[in-house]
């Protein structure tokens, strides 16, 4: 069975991706998650639960919380005000963590190469294009071009949902039997989702579109 | 099947190619998914492309999961495995027959994929480096045009196109050498080859039998594809074109606008000729009419001519006279879809 590594945050997109890679593509799945100092570290608990649910070979949670001291982002600073959903649609939102995704992918590549895993699955999706440059097809294509330079082991980054909207992802996840109650989207952290941050609003819109009411 | 994939990529269409044992999905010109049994992605794509089974095409109704995030730059070598592929110069598509709108889309494809190579039509060629037009040559009624004139002629009257993919160094040497070409007798060719090799120079030698490109003395292209040389250079016959690279070529600046926008611009231009013609003086009007056939193909030239006429008409007739005709002169500008062109025209007439 072909090996695959999934970048798993514990949110809707990467959790659906985990189930898709395991159940549809039937890969031998490894998962990697990151504590990068995010306010909503609760998502990592969800990631653990989902990795166990799917039955991954190994789930690593890598601590890169030093990023909190280096990078400026409303996602890393407890005191910073989070943007509204409307504000987040205007260019790059304050929740953008500078170059986070390339850092996460680079660490994932190192892990994958060490374990001879040829495929890395990345949950980028279309609704993030406008605000986050590192979720666009061109970014993934460029990363793959760099990876082609490795003469010893060829790794490919694959983003199955890069042309999907969040509602499309949820629709697919429901078919795959994903338990979305065990996913976390809220940027604010805390015990209950705030319901007003851009991530909560996106989540609610996606569920509403497929006719569901899940917190 | 390969030609269907090629067409879908170029026309940026969304299709599903269904084979007995799998399928290939193309979304807006990008190959995004391939499935064959338990295999997905590039691995499945390569097997499906080489399979011999029957296939059919359906429109792509829903966005599939993207199992292929490789772009054109990576896939091109795999899905267009032309015989004798040479990274410096290879035929990619043969005899593409486009109407103007399709050609328009194709030119966008050239830009978006940062295509490097040559487009060859009967009597002309365009050289592209990273999606930018670097050199254009067109033979029109016995005269050779280069630069934006040739570019616009080729875009408007291209006919069937052959597309050659080439290395950037081959295109840059070619474009630079063609800035200063000279015609020689075939007996001189061997001497030129020796000169390129001994002096380590860069340049080109073109005859109907062969295309040679030398980069720092090395012959990086030695093509006997006579279709390229006879179609692009029908005028050289038994002679040779030789060029030595030196001056760095600059991208050709030419606006690529739709048929509808060209028609609207030509209407505005013709009306300007009619209205302003009576004011600007016989001598000037005659010289404009003499150049008219070429001017009407080139948006920038039409705008430049209108600007000259407006200034002259303002000197002679005065601002009030121009103002009286303002609505008539500017009619149709707001319908132009190309933003750059519309703004240029608005700016042209804003002073009236």
Image (cartoon, rainbow, N blue to C red):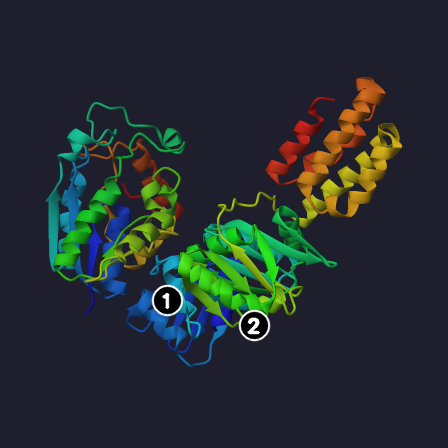
Q: Estimate the spatial distance between the alpha carbons at disc 1 and disc 2, rounded to whole Å.
A: 42 Å
Can residue B217 be seen by looking at this rendering? no
In the picture, which quadrant includes the N terminus of chain A? bottom left
Query: Measuring 22% from the left and 48% from the top, which residue is drawn there?
Result: A105
Can residue B281 be seen by looking at this rendering? yes
In the picture, which quadrant includes the C terminus of chain A? top left
Q: Which mark is residue B34?
A: 1
Q: Earlier in the sequence, mark 1 or mark 2?
A: 1
B317, above or below A89, in the image? above
Q: Quadrant of residue B289?
A: top right
| Left or right of A4 on screen, residue B244 | right
Crowding near the residue tagged with mark 2, few <14, some 14–19, many ≥20 C-alpha atoms within 10 Å = some
Q: Nearer the viewer, residue B218 or A158?
A: B218
Q: Nearer the viewer, residue A20 or B50?
A: B50
Query: Measuring 71% from the left and 22% from the top, which residue is drawn there?
Result: B351
- Percent x, y for residue B131? 49, 51
Numbered disc in front, either 1 or 2 = 2
Which element carries disc 2, helix, strand or loop? loop
Query: Measuring 45% from the left and 53% from the top, which residue is drawn there?
Result: B113
Which element carries disc 1, helix, strand or loop? strand
Find disc 2 in the rendering and name its residue: B209
- Percent x, y for residue B117? 49, 58
Query: Measuring 30% from the left and 32% from the top, which residue is drawn there?
Result: A197
- Percent x, y for residue B119? 56, 60
B157, above or below B343, in the image? below
- Percent x, y for residue B235? 67, 64
Q: Nearer the viewer, residue A180 or B250?
A: B250
């Amino acid at each position: 069975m072909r090996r695959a590594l999934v970048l798993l945050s514990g949110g809707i997109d990467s959790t659906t991706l985990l189930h898709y890679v395991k159940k549809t593509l039937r890969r031998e799945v490894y998962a990697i998650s990151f504590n990068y100092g995010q306010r909503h570290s609760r998502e990592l608990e969800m990631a653990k639960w989902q990795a166990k649910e799917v039955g991954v070979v190994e789930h690593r949670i890598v601590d890169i919380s030093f990023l909190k001291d280096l990078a400026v982002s409303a996602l890393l600073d407890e005191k910073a005000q989070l943007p509204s959903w409307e504000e987040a649609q205007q260019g790059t939102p304050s929740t953008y963590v500078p170059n986070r995704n390339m850092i996460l992918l680079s660490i994932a590549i190192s892990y994958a190469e060490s374990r001879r895993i040829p495929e890395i699955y990345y949950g980028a999706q279309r609704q993030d294009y406008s605000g986050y440059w590192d979720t666009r097809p061109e970014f993934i294509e460029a990363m793959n071009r760099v990876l082609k330079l490795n003469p010893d082991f060829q790794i490919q980054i694959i983003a199955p949902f890069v042309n999907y909207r969040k509602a499309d992802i949820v629709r697919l996840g429901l078919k795959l039997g994903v338990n979305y109650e065990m996913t976390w989207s809220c940027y604010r952290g805390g015990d209950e989702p705030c319901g007003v941050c851009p991530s909560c609003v996106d989540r609610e819109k996606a569920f509403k579109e497929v006719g569901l009411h899940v917190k | 099947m390969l030609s269907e994939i090629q067409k879908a990529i170029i026309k940026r269409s969304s299709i599903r190619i269904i084979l007995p044992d799998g399928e290939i999905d193309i979304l807006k010109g990008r190959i995004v998914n391939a499935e064959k049994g338990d295999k997905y992605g590039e691995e499945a794509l390569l097997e499906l492309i080489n399979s011999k089974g029957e296939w059919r095409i359906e429109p792509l109704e829903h966005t599939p999961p993207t199992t292929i995030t490789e772009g054109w730059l990576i896939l091109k070598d795999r899905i267009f495995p032309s015989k004798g592929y040479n990274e410096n110069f290879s035929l990619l598509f043969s005899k593409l027959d486009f109407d103007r709108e399709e050609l328009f889309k194709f030119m966008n494809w050239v830009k978006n994929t940062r295509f490097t190579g040559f487009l060859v039509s009967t009597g002309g060629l365009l050289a592209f480096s990273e999606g930018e037009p670097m050199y254009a040559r067109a033979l029109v009624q016995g005269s050779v045009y280069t630069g934006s004139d040739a570019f616009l002629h080729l875009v408007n009257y291209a006919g069937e196109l052959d597309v050659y993919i080439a290395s950037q160094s081959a295109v840059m040497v070619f474009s630079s050498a063609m800035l200063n070409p000279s015609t020689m007798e075939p007996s001189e060719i061997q001497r030129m080859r020796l000169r390129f090799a001994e002096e380590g120079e860069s340049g080109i030698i073109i005859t109907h039998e062969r295309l040679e490109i030398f980069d720092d003395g090395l012959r990086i292209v030695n093509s006997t594809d006579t279709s390229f040389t006879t179609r692009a250079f029908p005028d050289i016959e038994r002679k040779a074109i030789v060029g030595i690279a030196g001056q760095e070529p600059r991208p050709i600046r030419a606006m690529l606008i739709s048929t509808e926008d060209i028609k609207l611009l030509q209407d505005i231009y013709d009306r300007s000729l009619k209205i302003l013609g009576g004011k600007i003086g016989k001598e000037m009007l005659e010289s404009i009419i003499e150049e008219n056939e070429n001017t009407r193909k080139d948006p920038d030239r039409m705008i430049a001519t209108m600007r000259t006429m407006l200034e002259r008409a303002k000197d002679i007739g005065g601002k009030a006279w121009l103002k009286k005709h303002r609505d008539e002169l500017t009619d149709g500008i707001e319908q132009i879809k190309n933003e750059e062109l519309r703004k240029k025209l608005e700016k042209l007439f804003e002073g009236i």
